[in-house]
Image: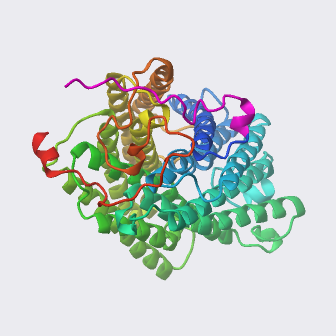
C-alpha cells in the first residue's frame, strides 16, 4: 500500500483572513504568537547588533572604536533589550502562546482579549525602549544601579525605565492567562500528571511572572520618582539607601533568570522524549522540580550582593540557598540523561539543540556554584567570569532551548518543513561559535579582567580576540535559521500533521491548525510520552 503525500488543509489559521485588520485585532492565540515572534526577532537583531559592537571594541586593548561613555551605553542597551525584550518573553509569548491551548485540548487561552492586549503593551514598551536608544541610549548598566541611575546619569534613564515598566504588564497578563488556562481548560482525562512537561514549565514560569514582575515595576517607578522629584529613596545624599534598590531589583531579577530558563527546560523535555522515543525518566520528579525552581528561586537574590556589605550571616544563608536551588536543575539534567539511556536516538536538528542545551546549561550551572561560594565570589565578582556564567545559562541555555523548540514546532506552526541539513549545520555552528565566544571569558575573569571596561591590559588581548572571533561565528549561526526558515514558508515541503511521530494533543491537529484547534474536544486516555516499547526496539 502506498502512502499518500501530505497535503495542506484548505482552511487554517493563517489563511482564514489575510487582512491586516484581522491580524491586528485577532484573538486567536496562534496569530498572537506570530505577532510576538516578529516583535521579539526585531529586538533580538537589535540586541545582537549591540553585542557585535561590544566585541568589535574589545578586539584591541585601547578602546579604538567608541569612547568609554558610548561603551557604557552599548553594554547597557544590549543587556536591557536582550533580557527584557527577548529572553524573558521569547518562549512564553511565542511557543507558549501557540502551544498551551493545543497541548491541553483547548480552543484558545482563557482570556483572548487580554492575550492580544499583552502584545500591544509589549509593543508600547518596546517603542519607549527604541526611543531611548535613538535619543542616545542609557549608560547605567542593565541593572539600573542607584544612586547613579536615580540622580546622576544624564542619559535617557526615565524613558527606558518607563519602557521596562510598561513591558512588565505584558508579562503579568501572559502569566495570569496561562495559570487560569492550565487550571480550568484542560481536556477530559488530562490530569495534572498527564500534562506535557512543557506545560508544567510554563505554569511554573507564570507563577514567577505574576509574583515577581510587580516588584521590578515598583522599583523602577521609585527610581523615576527619585529622578524626577528628588525624593530620598535610594540616594544617601537625600536620606535614601542604595542597598534597598539592590534588594528589590535582585528579588525580581534572579527569579527572572528562571523565567528565561524554565521554558527552555520544558522544551528540552519534549525534544528528549520525542527523539529518543522514550518516556521521560522520573516524570513526576521532573514536573515537581520546575515548581521547586520557581519557589526556591525567590529566596536566593542575596548571592548577587556578597560584596555589597550585607551581613556575613545573610551571606551564609544565601550561599546555602543558592546551592539548594541547583538541586532541581540537576535533577532535570540527570533525568534527561537517563531518558536517553537505551533510547532510539535520532539526531535531527531539534535534538541537536536539546543536546547542546544540556551540555552548555550544565557548564553554566556548575560555574554558578563557584559564584554561590562566598570566598570564590569575592575573587570573581564583577569580572568576565560572571559574564561567561550568565551567558552559558541565558544564551547557551535559554536560546538553545528556544531554537530547538522553534525548529520542532515549525512544521506545526507553518505546515512546512525546513531543509534539515541546513538546520543541523546551523545548530553545530551555533554550538561551536558560542563556546569560542564565552569559554575564554571564564579564563579572563579568573585572571581578573573586570566586566564593563572598554580598555584592558595587553596580555588579555589573545583571549578577547578569540571571544570576538567566536561572536562572529555565532552571529552566522543565528542568521542561518532566519534565512532557511523564511525560505521554507514558500518552498518547504508540506509537513503533514505529525512529521516527527511525536506524542501530544498538538500533533493531532492539522498543520497549520484551524482557528479553533479541534473540531471536538479531545479525550485523553494515556499518560504523557506514551511511546511504545516496540518503537524503541525498531529504532
In this view, the residue in front, 287 or 300, is: 287
Q: Is residue 108 left or right of residue 156?
A: left
Q: Residue at x 56, y 34 (%)?
A: 48
Q: Quadrant of the C terminus?
A: top left
Q: Residue at x 68, y 40 (%)?
A: 73
Splitting the image into 4 quarters, where does residue 40 fall? top right
In this view, the residue in front, 267 or 191, is: 191
Q: Is residue 444 visible?
A: no
Q: Is residue 458 left or right of residue 163?
A: left
Colouring:
rainbow
Q: In x, y percent, where is residue 378?
A: 45, 63
Above-or-below relation of 525 to 313: above
Q: Is residue 281 left or right of residue 187?
A: left
Q: In x, y percent, where is residue 91?
A: 51, 48
In this view, the residue in front, 101 or 41, is: 101
- Disc tally is 0
Q: Main secondary structure of the magenta part?
A: loop
Above-or-below relation of 473 to 332: above
Q: In x, y percent, where is residue 46?
A: 62, 33
Splitting the image into 4 quarters, where does residue 473 fall? top left
Q: Residue at x 25, y 59 (%)?
A: 335
Q: Quadrant of the N terminus?
A: top left
Residue at the bottom extreme, as displayed:
313
Q: Is residue 279 left or right of residue 476?
A: left
Give yes or no for residue 12 being in the magenta stretch. Answer: yes
Give yes or no for residue 506 being in the magenta stretch. Answer: no
Q: Which residues are magenta?
A: 1-24
Residue at the top extreme, as displayed:
491
Q: Is residue 266 visible?
A: yes
Q: In x, y percent, where is residue 448?
A: 44, 49
Q: Residue at x 22, y 45 (%)?
A: 276
Amino acid at each position: 500500500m502506498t502512502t499518500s503525500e501530505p497535503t495542506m488543509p484548505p482552511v487554517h489559521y493563517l489563511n482564514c483572513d489575510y487582512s491586516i485588520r484581522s491580524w491586528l485585532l485577532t484573538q486567536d492565540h496562534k496569530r498572537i504568537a506570530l505577532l510576538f515572534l516578529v516583535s521579539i526577532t526585531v529586538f533580538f537583531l537589535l540586541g545582537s547588533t549591540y553585542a557585535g559592537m561590544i566585541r568589535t571594541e574589545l578586539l584591541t586593548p585601547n578602546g579604538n572604536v567608541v569612547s568609554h561613555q558610548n561603551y557604557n551605553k552599548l553594554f547597557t542597551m544590549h543587556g536591557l533589550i536582550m533580557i527584557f525584550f527577548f529572553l524573558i518573553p521569547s518562549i512564553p509569548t511565542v511557543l507558549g502562546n501557540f502551544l498551551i491551548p493545543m497541548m491541553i485540548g483547548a480552543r484558545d487561552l482563557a482570556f483572548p482579549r487580554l492575550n492580544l492586549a499583552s502584545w500591544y503593551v509589549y509593543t508600547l514598551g518596546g517603542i519607549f525602549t527604541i526611543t531611548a536608544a535613538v535619543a542616545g541610549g542609557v549608560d547605567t548598566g542593565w541593572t539600573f544601579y542607584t544612586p547613579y541611575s536615580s540622580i546622576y546619569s544624564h542619559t535617557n534613564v526615565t524613558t527606558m525605565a518607563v519602557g521596562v515598566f510598561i513591558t512588565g504588564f505584558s508579562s503579568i497578563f501572559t502569566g495570569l492567562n496561562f495559570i487560569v488556562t492550565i487550571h480550568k481548560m484542560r481536556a477530559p482525562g488530562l490530569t495534572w500528571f498527564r500534562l506535557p512537561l512543557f506545560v508544567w514549565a510554563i505554569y511554573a514560569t507564570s507563577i514567577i511572572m505574576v509574583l515577581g514582575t510587580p516588584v521590578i515595576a515598583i522599583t523602577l517607578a521609585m527610581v523615576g520618582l527619585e529622578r524626577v522629584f528628588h525624593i530620598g529613596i535610594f540616594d544617601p545624599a537625600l536620606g535614601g539607601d542604595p542597598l534597598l534598590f539592590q534588594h528589590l531589583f535582585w528579588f525580581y531579577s534572579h527569579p527572572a533568570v528562571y523565567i528565561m530558563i524554565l521554558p527552555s527546560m520544558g522544551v528540552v523535555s519534549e525534544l528528549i522524549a520525542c527523539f529518543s522515543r522514550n518516556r521521560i525518566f522520573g516524570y513526576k520528579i521532573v514536573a515537581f522540580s520546575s515548581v521547586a525552581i520557581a519557589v526556591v528561586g525567590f529566596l536566593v537574590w542575596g548571592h548577587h550582593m556578597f560584596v555589597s556589605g550585607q551581613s556575613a550571616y545573610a551571606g551564609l544563608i544565601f550561599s546555602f540557598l543558592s546551592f539548594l536551588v541547583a538541586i532541581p536543575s540537576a535533577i532535570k539534567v540527570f533525568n534527561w540523561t537517563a531518558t536517553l539511556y537505551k533510547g532510539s536516538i535520532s539526531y535531527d536538528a531539534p535534538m541537536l539543540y536539546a543536546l547542546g542545551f544540556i551540555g552548555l546549561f550544565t557548564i553554566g550551572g556548575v560555574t554558578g556554584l563557584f559564584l554561590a561560594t562566598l570566598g570564590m565570589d569575592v575573587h570573581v565578582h564583577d569580572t568576565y567570569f560572571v559574564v561567561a556564567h550568565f551567558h552559558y545559562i541565558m544564551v547557551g541555555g535559554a536560546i538553545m532551548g528556544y531554537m530547538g523548540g522553534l525548529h520542532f514546532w515549525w512544521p506545526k506552526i507553518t505546515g512546512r518543513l525546513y531543509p534539515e541539513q541546513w538546520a543541523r549545520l546551523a545548530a553545530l555552528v551555533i554550538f561551536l561559535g558560542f563556546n569560542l565566544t564565552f569559554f575564554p571569558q571564564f579564563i579572563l575573569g579568573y585572571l581578573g579582567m573586570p566586566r564593563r571596561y572598554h580598555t584592558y591590559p595587553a596580555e588579555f588581548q589573545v583571549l578577547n580576540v578569540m571571544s570576538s572571533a567566536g561572536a562572529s561565528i555565532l552571529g552566522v549561526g543565528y542568521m542561518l535559521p532566519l534565512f532557511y526558515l523564511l525560505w521554507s514558508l514558500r518552498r518547504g515541503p508540506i509537513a503533514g500533521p505529525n512529521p516527527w511521530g511525536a506524542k501530544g494533543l498538538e500533533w493531532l491537529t492539522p498543520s497549520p491548525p484551524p482557528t479553533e484547534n479541534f473540531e471536538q474536544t479531545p479525550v485523553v486516555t494515556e499518560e504523557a510520552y506514551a511511546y511504545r516499547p516496540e518503537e524503541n526496539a525498531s529504532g
